[in-house]
Image: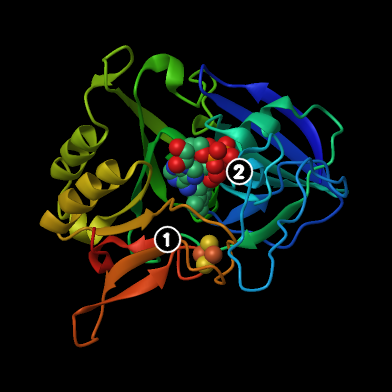
Amino acid sequence: MNVLSNVRLCRGHYLMRLGGREFPPTLPGQFVQLQCRVPGEQPGWSAVEVAPGDWPKPTGRELTDAEPLLRRPLSLAGRYDTEFDVELDIIYSVVGTGTAWLARAGQGDEISLLGPLGNAFAISESKPRAALVGGGVGIPPMIYLASAMQAAGKRAVAFCGARSADMLPITLTPSQFGQFGVDSVIATDDGSLGWKGFVSEPLAAWLDAMDAPDRQAVVYACGPEPMMRAVAEICIARNVECQVSLERHMACGMGTCQSCVCKTKSDAEQGWSYKLCCTDGPVFNARDLIW
Ligand SMILES: Cc1cc2nc3c(=O)[nH]c(=O)nc-3n(C[C@H](O)[C@H](O)[C@H](O)COP(=O)(O)OP(=O)(O)OC[C@H]3O[C@@H](n4cnc5c(N)ncnc54)[C@H](O)[C@@H]3O)c2cc1C
Ligand code: FES
């Protein structure tokens, strides 16, 4: 696909819109693996030679070069289909070589992406309300989910958490959630915008103000693991369904390398088994996870 735009949203995040003639059907919660180098161009590093009976001796450049070997997993933050093309939104934070390369990409540049990958958030048929809880780079999949909530006729509220106002990857007027009829509650750790504290606190207050939240609402969460764990505990204590999207380190993104395992409850003798975040997830029922 080609970069249509790549703009800075706040101090820490960029919004990249990619466009192409076609892309397979996608669902909120799914992700793509982006190749963070020019498609078809030889990278600066070369294959590691291994002598028979010897161990590979990587130089380090294979992992740290400005054009990394492995693709990087990023959630879909939105999809827009027109008569002629498909547009996909990615919101990313620059944390290392791959995302720094993405930040340098300009309008018209070609980017290779693999996907859609992983499962998706399940929209409840019986429960009319939803809380979309996102922290930092966990907010992007919630924007895509907000569009699906509107299409399904659900009443949703977005709970967005960030360290400070200038690290919030959404605009407020107009808000990316507002375009889908979804109100946003903002929480910042330092109180520079909205609720001062963790985003899980207003979520708990929202659930407690509702009659029979277990029959009315589903909570969806993505973000730092301590945040998701707190959200899961709040929901489990109130018997409310909670789906969390895990962001584990991933290499292949398609079930081969086993780098993304997470522990889940199971009928196995030891009471648990490993699941793969990339193919069994990234979305899991919070009750099934062993944190
Ligand atoms: C399913 C999934 C969806 C994701 N969606 C988004 C998204 O929408 N927006 C976004 O900004 N990021 C998202 N991430 C995280 C993103 O993949 C990483 O930030 C990215 O791969 C870092 O690449 P890099 O080359 O810039 O950093 P690297 O040079 O590889 O690493 C830089 C630093 O980031 C840390 N890091 C790398 N990968 C992860 C990870 N998966 N989780 C936590 N820390 C990591 C490393 O430990 C290191 O400290 C997602 C991850 C997964 C698994
Ligand atoms: S990322 Fe390779 S198995 Fe999940």
Give the image location of residue 253, x and y in percent: 58, 61
Q: In this rendering, would 60 be left or right of 291?
A: right
The image quarter in which residue 43 lies: top right
Residue under circle 1? 283
Element assignment for label 1: strand
- Give the percent coordinates (x, y) of residue 52: 67, 73
Compared with residue 84, is residue 260 higher up or lower down, i.e. above or below? below
Query: In the drawing, does residue 143 fall left or right of residue 115?
Result: left
The amino acid sitting under disc 2 is Gly
Please state the total of marks drawn on the protein image: 2
Q: Pointer 2 and pointer 1: residues touching (CB < 8 Å)?
A: no
Can residue 268 be seen? yes
Residue 60: image tag: 2
Q: Depth-wise, is mark 2 or mark 1 nearer the camera?
A: 2
Of residues 123 and 70, which is closer to you in this image?
70
**Residue at 62% across, 39% down:** 90
- Residue 268 in the image, given as x and y percentages of width and height: 24, 86
Residue at disc 2, CB closer than 8 Å to ligand 1: no
